[in-house]
């Protein structure tokens, strides 16, 4: 922190302390501004003009006061906080005064440097979304450094979920917003990460339809078709109107699981034999990574396919070895499916153990739907009407024509 104190002092006075003359000049400035006498020799030592010695409390306190702090202790406690707010204010001024090039240069210079800047980037984009500056957001996502390959998994999810939540307040008919959702980096970092299953009846499926009609990327096209098929299923449309999805080798494992999940939506009578083939195809070192089952897990819950749940539980046995799982969220997804299955089996001991360690909030896109099923389970455990009330309240937002009272009471029958 002493180096930081030297830096901000020199920044304030507008010149570097590199000589006897500079030291005397700073001594005079401090005396005039703070009415404190500090020797130029003390200043020379502190700034390394002559051999440095350990700074006294008086020196540290004096220079801290010169920079607007009560003491050196106050400086250590509050410098980062004050500096943070100053930076926030400066960024906000840049955004609202239309200094687009300056903002783009700032972002490009700091991208992929730290988790801290990922949070800053999210703040900037969210603010731009709120003021509807979709053109500048698109230019940010046009930056080469915004390619999803440059972010680790955690930052990708953080960006996608944090920005995705705000899309619901946007006018999706805005022409510039329509250009933004066709940006490939925006699709990879936001659209495919924040999958808003709770808003399929409203804005989200409209966005997916726009992307589906315009994209030339095969993986994005298939992703959209999987979402649209789910919407058709929840609205009880005929299977014949479903898109037929085909897997390609370079698709992400979760997209491959989404493609296979279509068999569940279409109530394929040969689902287990197809699962066996899918399992063998994607075996790695004798087991299948859990991400290859991610969408299959939740679709088996949605379609009440307890046979598929049992098959998955039998295949995924080393559940306590976290290195076996791609990410904890995928493990959480698997554990929740087990909770549903063992509730059906009336295995109270396993249900209690699973529910104790389950975190519904870790479902991200699936959180609303997970809460629906959690309430169905809890009603079966203790028959309390409050779980039905909670279920109906959530169902009202997601899809009340699919998630009905009848579905609630008959789920395990």
Image (tube, grey):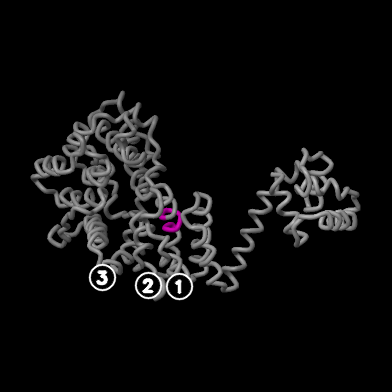
Secondary structure of the residue carrying numbered label 3: helix
The image quarter in which residue 211 lies: bottom left
Disc 1 to disc 2, C-alpha distance: 8 Å
Mark sitting on residue 213: 3
CB of mark 2 within 8 Å of CB of mark 3? no
Q: Can residue 376 be seen in the rendering of this structure?
A: no
Secondary structure of the residue carrying numbered label 1: helix
Q: Residue furthest top?
A: 349
Residue 111 in percent (x, y) is at 48, 57
Report the span colored magenta.
Answer: 160-165
Residue at which label 1 appears: 135
**Image: 341 above or below 142:** above
**Image: 155 above or below 183:** above
Judged by its main secondary structure, the magenta piece is helix
Mark sitting on residue 179: 2
The image quarter in which residue 208 lies: bottom left
The C terminus: image quadrant: top left
How crowded is the residue under tag 2: few (<14 C-alpha within 10 Å), some, or many (20+)? few
The N terminus: image quadrant: top right
Residue 346 in percent (x, y) is at 25, 28
Q: Nearer the viewer, residue 86 or 378?
A: 86
Based on the picture, tell me whether residue 331 belongs to the magenta stretch: no
Q: Earlier in the sequence, mark 2 or mark 3?
A: 2
Disc 3 to disc 1, C-alpha distance: 21 Å
């Amino acid at each position: 922190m002493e180096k930081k104190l030297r830096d901000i002092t020199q920044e304030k006075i507008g010149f570097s302390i590199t000589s006897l003359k500079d030291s005397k000049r700073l001594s005079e400035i401090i005396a005039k501004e703070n009415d404190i006498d500090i020797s130029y020799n003390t200043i020379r030592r502190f700034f390394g003009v002559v051999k440095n010695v350990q700074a006294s409390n008086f020196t540290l306190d004096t220079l801290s006061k010169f920079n607007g702090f009560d003491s050196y202790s106050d400086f250590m406690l509050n410098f980062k906080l004050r500096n943070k707010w100053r930076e926030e204010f400066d960024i906000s001024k840049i955004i609202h005064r239309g200094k687009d090039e300056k903002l783009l240069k700032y972002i490009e210079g700091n991208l992929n440097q730290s988790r801290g800047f990922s949070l800053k980037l999210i703040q900037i984009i969210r603010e731009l979304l709120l003021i509807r500056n979709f053109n500048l957001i698109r230019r940010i996502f046009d930056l080469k450094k915004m390619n999803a390959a440059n972010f680790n998994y955690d930052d990708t999810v953080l960006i996608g979920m944090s920005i995705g939540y705000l899309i619901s307040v946007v006018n999706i008919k805005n022409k510039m917003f329509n250009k933004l959702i066709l940006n490939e980096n925006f699709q990879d970092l936001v659209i495919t990460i924040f999958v808003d299953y709770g808003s399929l009846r409203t804005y989200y499926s409209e966005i997916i339809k726009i992307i589906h009609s315009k994209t030339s990327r095969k993986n994005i096209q298939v992703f959209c078709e999987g979402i649209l098929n789910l919407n058709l299923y929840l609205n009880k449309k005929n299977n014949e109107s479903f898109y037929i999805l085909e897997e390609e080798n370079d698709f992400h494992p979760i997209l491959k699981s989404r493609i296979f999940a279509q068999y569940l939506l279409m109530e394929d009578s040969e689902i287990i034999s197809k699962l066996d083939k899918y399992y063998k195809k994607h075996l790695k070192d004798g087991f299948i990574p859990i991400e290859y089952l991610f969408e299959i897990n939740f679709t088996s819950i949605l379609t009440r396919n307890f046979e598929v749940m049992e098959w998955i539980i039998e295949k995924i046995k080393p559940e306590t070895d976290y290195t076996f799982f791609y990410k904890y969220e995928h493990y959480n997804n698997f554990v929740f499916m087990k909770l549903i299955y063992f509730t059906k089996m009336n295995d109270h001991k396993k249900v209690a153990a699973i529910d104790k360690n389950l975190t519904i909030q870790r479902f991200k896109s699936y959180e609303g739907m997970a809460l629906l099923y959690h309430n169905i389970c809890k009603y079966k455990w203790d028959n309390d009407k409050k779980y039905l009330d909670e279920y109906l309240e959530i169902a009202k937002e997601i899809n009340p024509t699919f998630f009905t009272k009848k579905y609630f009471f008959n789920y395990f029958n």
